[in-house]
Structures are given as structure tokens and as C-alpha cells.
Amino acid sequence: MARYGGEEFSILLPNTDLAGSIKVAENIQQAIYDQARDLQENKVPAKQGQ
């Protein structure tokens, strides 16, 4: 995996056909979605003072 631009990444998948590549991309997309959802649902309590 390499960062290609600001928000773009490039992933080399040797010996992977188109169907396998699509599956990997979908899994990554779902993992990002799940993490963003978890961050929105779990509010971090604010600590005041010190």
C-alpha cells in the first residue's frame, strides 16, 4: 500500500484477478465505513478543568 495523493492510496495485488481485486476493495471500503460509524456513535466525554 502506498499513498498516492491527498486521500488516494494505491495497493498492489499480485496474482489477483479482477474479481479478487474488487473483493479486496469492497472489504477495505466496508472497514473504513465501519470505523467512521463507530467513531460517530462513541462520543468521547469532554474533561473540564486541569
Image (cartoon, rainbow, N blue to C red):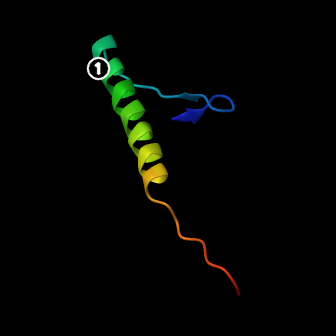
Q: Residue at x 63, y 32 (%)?
A: 7
> How many numbered marks have been drawn onto this rendered protein structure?
1
Residue 15 visible here:
no
Residue for point 28% across, 14% down: 19
* Rendering coords of residue 15 (x, y %): 32, 20
Residue 13, by quadrant, is top left
From what the image shows, is residue 9 above or below residue 50? above
Residue 19 visible in the picture = yes
Q: Nearer the viewer, residue 21 or 32?
A: 32
In terms of depth relative to the viewer, which is nearer, 43 or 38?
43
Q: Secondary structure at mark 1?
A: helix
* Figure quadrant of residue 28: top left
Is 49 situated above or below 20? below
The residue under label 1 is which amino acid type? Answer: Gly
Image height check: is 48 above or below 46? below
Residue 25 quadrant? top left
* Horizontal side of residue 18 vs 42, given as left or right: left
Quadrant for the C terminus in the image: bottom right
Residue 6, x across and y down, in percent:
69, 32
Q: Horizontal placement of 48 versus 12: left or right?
A: right
Determine the residue positioned at 41% across, 31% down: 29
**Residue 40 position in % (x across, y down):** 48, 50
Q: Residue furthest top?
A: 18
Closer to us: 47 or 30: 47
Crowd rating for badge 1 (residues with CA inside 10 Å; few <14, some 14–19, many 20+): few
Q: Is residue 32 above or below residue 41?
A: above
Q: Position of residue 14 (x, y in %)?
A: 38, 23
Residue designated by label 1: 20
- Residue drawn at (61%, 77%), measured in percent from left and top? 47
Q: Is residue 5 rendered to the left or right of residue 12?
A: right
Q: Residue furthest bottom?
A: 50
